[in-house]
Image: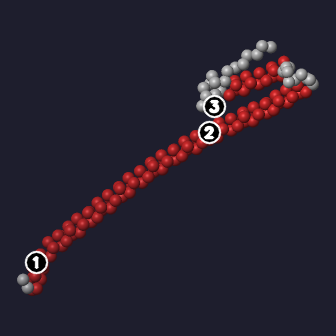
């Protein structure tokens, strides 16, 4: 086919060529629209998953912070109890020293007041401890009954 024949054929069928060209352009645009639509759906799905993971991480972090705060509260209460017990022990020592200061026979017999004070302190500490030593059972420290 020569150029003149081709030109003549195109001149006779230009409407058909234009319709086919428009159809090809429309099909191409539809494929591009589908491609970008699928990309948008994938991005939306990834965003939803990232938000869900972020929310889960925030919930876990909140639970960890709550647990740490609870542990700190318990540790602080335990420390306060230990300090109170230490002050009570120092007061008991001072009371015993005062009670024994005027007693010449202190090495032989403990005065009843001092004995009662020591026993009361021992039982109070034992009762308030509520098994804080996890390596021993609650019955490891027996109560001492005093004959007064």
Tag nearer the camera, 3 or 1: 3
Q: How is the image coloured?
A: secondary structure
Q: Is 124 above or below relative to 23?
A: above
* Residue 31 spot, x, y in % from top left: 26, 63
Q: Is 23 above or below relative to 93?
A: below
User: Which residue has dot 1 on it?
Assistant: 12
* Residue 137 spot, x, y in % from top left: 60, 26
Callout count? 3
User: Which residue has dot 3 on it?
Assistant: 133
Which tag, 2 or 1, sits closer to the chain's start? 1
Residue 69's quadrant in the figure?
top right
Q: Secondary structure at mark 1?
A: helix
Residue found at x 39% / y 54%: 46
Which tag, 3 or 1, sits closer to the chain's start? 1
Cα distance in 3D space between marks 2 and 1: 91 Å
User: Which residue has dot 2 on it?
Assistant: 71
Residue furthest top as drawn: 147
Q: Is 33 above or below relative to 66?
A: below
Residue found at x 14% / y 72%: 16
* Residue 115 spot, x, y in % from top left: 81, 21
Residue 32's quadrant in the figure?
bottom left
Q: Residues within 10 Å of mark 1 (few under 14, many from 20)?
A: few
Q: Quadrant of the N terminus?
A: bottom left
Cα distance in 3D space between marks 3 and 1: 104 Å
Cα distance in 3D space between marks 2 and 3: 17 Å
Q: Horizontal placement of 74 versus 12: left or right?
A: right
State the residue in front, 122 or 33. Answer: 122
State the residue in front, 77 or 103. Answer: 103
Q: Horizontal placement of 12 versus 106: left or right?
A: left
Residue found at x 63% / y 22%: 139
- The answer to whether residue 7 shows anywhere in this view is yes
């Amino acid at each position: 086919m020569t150029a003149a024949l081709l030109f003549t054929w195109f001149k006779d069928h230009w409407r058909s060529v234009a319709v086919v060209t428009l159809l090809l352009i429309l099909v191409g645009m539809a494929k591009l629209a589908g491609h970008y639509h699928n990309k948008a759906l994938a991005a939306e799905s990834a965003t939803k998953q990232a938000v869900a993971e972020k929310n889960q991480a925030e919930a876990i972090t909140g639970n960890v912070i709550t647990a740490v705060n609870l542990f700190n509260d318990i540790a602080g209460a335990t420390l306060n109890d230990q300090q109170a017990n230490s002050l009570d022990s120092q007061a008991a020592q001072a009371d015993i020293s005062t009670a024994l200061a005027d007693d010449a026979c202190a090495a032989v017999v403990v005065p009843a007041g001092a004995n009662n004070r020591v026993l009361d302190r021992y039982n109070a500490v034992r009762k308030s401890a509520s098994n804080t030593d996890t390596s021993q059972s609650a019955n490891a420290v027996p109560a001492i009954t005093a004959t007064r």
